Image: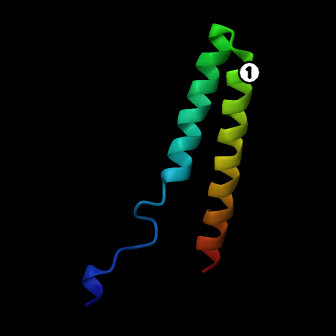
Amino acid sequence: MLEFATPLQVGGGGFLYWAIVFFVLAIIAAAVGARGVAGISMEIARIFVLIFIVLAIVALLL
């Protein structure tokens, strides 16, 4: 029965993936000169990284 259990880490990398995507988008937007898009993308990436860190700490404590 336990051999079919999936660990908590499976599929949990979504926040980190999207944080990297928005960070790359911010870098590209800054290089092109779209400062507004770059700023918003960096804020979204920062929020996703913070959520990822909080969830990682909670997962380590449980």
Rendered position, 23 above or below 56: above
Q: Along the horizontal axis of the image, is 10 left or right of 24?
A: left
22 or 2, which lies in front? 22
In this rendering, position of residue 18 left or right of residue 1: right
Q: Residue at x 60, y 80 (%)?
A: 62
Residue type, numbered disc 1: Gly
Q: Quadrant of residue 56?
A: bottom right
Q: Position of residue 47 (x, y in %)?
A: 70, 47
Q: Is residue 17 left or right of residue 11?
A: right
Q: Quadrant of the N terminus?
A: bottom left
Residue 33, placed above or below residue 29: above
Which residue is the extreme one toward the top? 32
Q: Secondary structure at mark 1?
A: helix
Outermost residue toward the bottom in this view: 1
Image point (74%, 27%), residue name: 39
Residue at point 67%, 40% (across, down): 44
Give how far across and how far down residue 32 sits, in percent: 63, 9
**Residue tagged by mark 1?**
36
